[in-house]
Amino acid sequence: MTVQNSTSAHAKRSRKKAASSSSLIPKFMKNPKTTMALALLIIDSLLVSFIIAYVPYTKIDWDAYMSQVSGFLGGERDYKNLKGDTGPLVYPAGFLYVYSAIQYVTGGQVFPAQILFGILYIINLGIVLLIYVKTDVLPWWALILLCLSKRVHSIFVLRLFNDCFAMTLLHAAMGSILFGWWHLGLIIFSAAVSIKMNVLLYAPSLFILMLKAMSISGVISALAGAALVQIVLGLPFLLSFPIEYISRAFNLGRVFIHFWSVNFKFVPEPIFVSKEFAVSLLIAHLVLLMLFAHYKWCKHEGGVFKFLRSRISFCSVTSCSAWPKTLKKEHIVTSMFVGNFIGIICARSLHYQFYSWYFYSLPHLLWITPFPTLLRVLIFVGIELCWNIFPSNLYSSLLLLCLHLLILCGLWYSMAENPYESDKSDSRKVK
């Protein structure tokens, strides 16, 4: 009897010890996606350090950025007088504040700026990995694709482009929205726009998501907060030279140089720079957005027109009581990534740094298509190859367009699932 009691007690102690040792392992580490994400952050941190130490820096826009910032810090508030060796300043005021801070920290020197951008790269990668871990689309092993771009590493730590800050803030805005912090997300989104306007490509799908997830008053207050960010950041210029600031910082009609374009390089230059070509791409952009909004993003609600009528025009007490609702994280990420990707396809010119605008969305987009895994990987590799051919040529730009259109077809034929966590109205308040 004594032996049995001793054996039983020993077994209990063993179970407790095993349970305690198991509890020492954080719960989130039991998710293979999380473990993979942490491993990738560590490995990529080492890779970025190696690139900064041993790969030569490429001079492109850094000197121009510093010249423009120096003019601003010297008291110049007329945007037409803020220039660099690559031309006049064409970015909103947030750009000046960010690069003024960088100049203060680095003294305008390249090497410490590279270290700063290396840290920014890891922060951005961490946010992107968080988005992928929070969504159930990509398998754990495919997270490695997010770290395999030679071009994106170069954009961050060898070129020091402002696109890096804009996209990091954009991803941070998406992360905030996934946690339900819509107002904070819109403020961060507006801050991203203040650095570079390409972020506005996400705006159409984001607006539809806001109408789905928020009350009308919530949408209005969130948009007001975003507008306030633009006003506050641009105030020194709006008070002194408002026309010059708005016309140059928010110029939607700029024509990029044909030589530097990665896409549509196969289009003859006279057609490429023509107004007719620009208008045609704009029409294609609007048509594609409307088609996806009607048949994909708002399919569950009966189409975009029925949805908008129920939310805005005929917002009766009965219809408004159905909102706000909790959106599935996958629907949020898919809608925003697809909306931006449509803009990428219809952009007249994509310079090499513009790859950062959508690279991190490619694995998600590919894995929601009905394509087999091998084809997804081959498309990913093909796009990366196109972006690493310099200068781009007829064949690389044509291949890039074909791969983009192939993804778009896959997205069109992908399943349009119920975007809501449940069909019942969400009693929680949207923050």
Image (tube, rainbow, N blue to C red):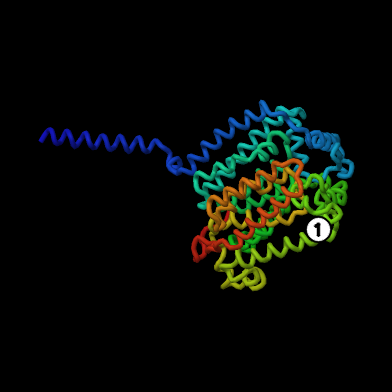
The percent coordinates of residue 124 (x first, y second) are 62, 41
Q: Quadrant of residue 217?
A: bottom right
Q: Pick whichever, 359 or 106, lies toward us.
A: 359
**Could one spot residue 271 in this view of the protein?**
yes
- Residue 238 appears in the picture as rendered: no
Mark 1 crowd level (few <14, some 14–19, many ≥20, 10 Å Cα): some
Name the residue at the front extreme. Answer: 395
Numbered circles on residues, count: 1
Identify the residue at horizontal 65%, vertical 33% (top origin).
118
Specify the quadrant that holds the N terminus.
top left
Quick one: 153 or 380, which is closer to the camera? 380
* Residue for badge 1: 278
Q: Residue at x 51, y 36 (%)?
A: 39
Q: Position of residue 28 (x, y in %)?
A: 45, 42
State the residue in front, 17 or 221.
Answer: 17
Percent coordinates x, y for residue 119 in the rendering: 64, 34
Residue 406 found in image quarter? bottom right
In the rendered structure, the answer to whether residue 389 lies left or right of residue 268 reads left
Label 1: state its secondary structure.
helix
- Left/right of residue 86 with respect to residue 389 in the rendered view: right
Q: Residue at x 78, y 36 (%)?
A: 60
Q: Nearer the viewer, residue 131 or 341?
A: 341
With 381 as the anchor, is 284 left or right in this view?
Answer: right
Q: Residue furthest left?
A: 1
Query: In this image, 426 relative to 67: left or right?
Result: left
On screen, residue 220 above or below 123: below
Q: Position of residue 96 (x, y in %)?
A: 78, 40
Residue at the right extreme?
A: 81
